[in-house]
Image (cartoon, rainbow, N blue to C red):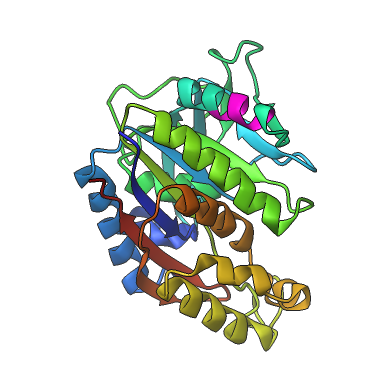
Amino acid sequence: MPLVAAAIAPHGFPVIPALDDGAAEGGVETPRAMAALGRLFNDRQVEAVVVVGPHGIRADGFFAMVDAARAAGTLRWKSRSVEVNVPCDRSLIEAINNASGARGIPVARVSYAGNRADQAVIPLDWGALVPLWFLGHDQNEAGTGDVLGNAPTTSGGPAAVLITPSRSLSREAMVDFGRTLGEVISRDVRNIGVVASCDWAHTHRADGPYGAHEAAERVDAVVVDAIGRNAITDLLALAEIDVANAAIDGLWQALILAGVQDVTPFTLELQSYEAPTYYGMLVATAAVDHD
């Protein structure tokens, strides 16, 4: 089967209910929308998921793709913590690498620890960990978040491909890579999902690490409008100065998803948008049907 589910998802720590201390810093609607996203991917019987995010290992000028047996990470928020350990889908990694190489798209395979990819374990960043938690990787077994620890003893969600794009590449390159990704997925025999892990403007409040800027509300409004109209490629026109002043981190991953959409059309439905602290979070999902 080709692509069966797609989403744009946030990655703020407190979106995970197990980390929420009741302060609603993960918003009110966002955790509910993320739970619904998880149900969608489960209902679509997703067997492997590609997560494209901004916070993984980066390689300047490349699309960095994890080439390891699994990824492990721990998130700590105030007095709480969660651990996630996810297997990596080696066959899909290989197919994406080969297709990208044939097109001259710069992909760097990155790994950590063991020198053999089938023994390597890479640190799992929050940009991937948060959406994966909602995709069935919420067993939270003690010690499994340590890259030198053991694999979990219980089965979780789908195997993952983890990709981090370099922002030194053009916006058009993001769409082009997405098209290649979409073509690879269309040739796979399994049910595949894609998640663009995106937070948006980070300058909504003066007490945040990036300070406040008037561009935050304005840029997020443009993003919400474009995604609400299922028109991700409209974000190609965002002014660079506004991207910088709003400090968004979702543009590049969203454009990759737009490339996937070029190959396998689907309609994103906006589920929620909130900015409960200094950054904006948006959830949009699509069930992809095939005749």
Q: Residue at x 53, y 83 (%)?
A: 221
Please tell me whether residue 65 is drawn above or below residue 98 in the rendered image. Answer: below
47 to the left or right of 51: left
Looking at this view, is 41 or 131 the one in front?
A: 41
Residue located farthest toward the bottom when viewing the structure as drawn: 214
Picture coordinates of residue 227, whole percent (x, y): 46, 71
User: Picture quarter containing residue 119?
Assistant: top right
Q: Residue at x 67, y 84 (%)?
A: 215
Looking at this view, is 233 or 60 the one in front?
A: 233
* Highlighted range, magenta: 96-101
Please tell me whether residue 191 is drawn above or below residue 233 in the rendered image. Answer: above
33 to the left or right of 195: left
User: Picture quarter containing residue 274?
Assistant: bottom left
Residue located farthest toward the top when viewing the structure as drawn: 116
276 magenta-colored: no
Please tell me whether residue 107 is drawn above or below residue 221 in the rendered image. Answer: above
Q: Residue at x 28, y 46 (%)?
A: 41
Considering the whole magenta stretch, tell me its main secondary structure: helix
Picture coordinates of residue 54, whole percent (x, y): 62, 51
Looking at this view, is 291 or 46 the one in front?
A: 291
Residue 55 seen in the current view: no
- Give the mark count: 0
Residue 170 seen in the current view: yes
Q: Residue at x 37, y 45 (%)?
A: 133
Residue located farthest toward the left when viewing the structure as drawn: 43
Picture coordinates of residue 125, whole percent (x, y): 57, 43
Picture coordinates of residue 243, whole percent (x, y): 70, 72
Quadrant where the image shows the N terminus: top left
Please tell me whether residue 36 is drawn above or below residue 29 in the rendered image. Answer: above
